[in-house]
């Protein structure tokens, strides 16, 4: 090849491009454990229980705030329209609160029941 030619140099062999790594231990040296879902299962159960408990607390607090605001409003003005709104609020609360209380009771019972069976000898 002459100096000034536009041709690239010939490629190098593949062995020269990728040097072998010798700083890694062999695969047999790694301690590989099978996946244990119990660790993640307890974490997810706890998160679900907390989510449902916070949902229940939020519903109860929202109901108390709505009731308090309605009482304050009725004390200052005529509240015939608010009486109809209270009936709607009571119906909505009974439709939402009852299943959430049932879910919270079932989840907490299942969560603590599973913990007591796991901790017994």
Image (cartoon, rainbow, N blue to C red):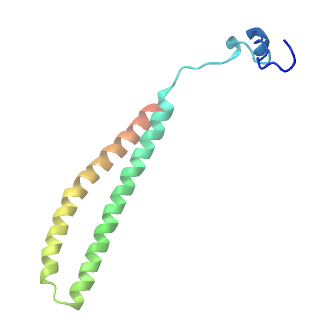
Q: Quadrant of the N terminus?
A: top right
Residue 109, relative to residue 92: is it above or below? above
Would you say 42 lies left or right of 4 here?
A: left
Visible in this render: residue 45? yes
In the image, what residue occupies the spot 39% across and 41% down? 111
Would you say 109 lies left or right of 83 here?
A: right
In the image, what residue occupies the spot 44% across and 40% down? 44
Q: Quadrant of residue 9?
A: top right
| Outermost right residue | 3
Residue 53 in percent (x, y) is at 38, 54
Q: Quadrant of residue 10?
A: top right
Residue 73, relative to residue 31: is it above or below? below
Would you say 9 lies left or right of 48 here?
A: right
In the image, what residue occupies the spot 22% across and 62% down? 93
Residue 113 in percent (x, y) is at 38, 38
In the image, what residue occupies the spot 30% across and 44% down? 106
Total labels: the figure holds: 0
22 vs 80, nearest the viewer:
22
Residue 48 in percent (x, y) is at 40, 45
Residue 14, relative to residue 66: is it above or below? above
Would you say 58 lies left or right of 3 here?
A: left
Visible in this render: residue 121? no
Q: Quadrant of residue 18?
A: top right
1 vs 24, nearest the viewer:
1
Residue 52 in percent (x, y) is at 36, 51
């Amino acid at each position: 090849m002459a100096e000034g030619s536009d041709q690239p140099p010939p490629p190098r062999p593949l062995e020269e491009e990728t040097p072998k790594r010798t700083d890694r231990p062999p695969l047999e040296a790694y301690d590989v454990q099978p996946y244990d879902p119990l660790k993640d299962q307890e974490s997810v159960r706890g998160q679900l229980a907390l989510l449902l408990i916070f949902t229940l607390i939020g519903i109860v607090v929202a109901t108390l705030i709505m009731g308090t605001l309605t009482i304050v409003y009725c004390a200052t003005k005529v509240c015939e329209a608010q009486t109809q709104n209270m009936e709607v609020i009571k119906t909505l609360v009974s439709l939402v609160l009852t299943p959430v209380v049932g879910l919270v009771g079932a989840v907490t019972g299942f969560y603590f029941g599973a913990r007591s069976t796991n901790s017994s000898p």
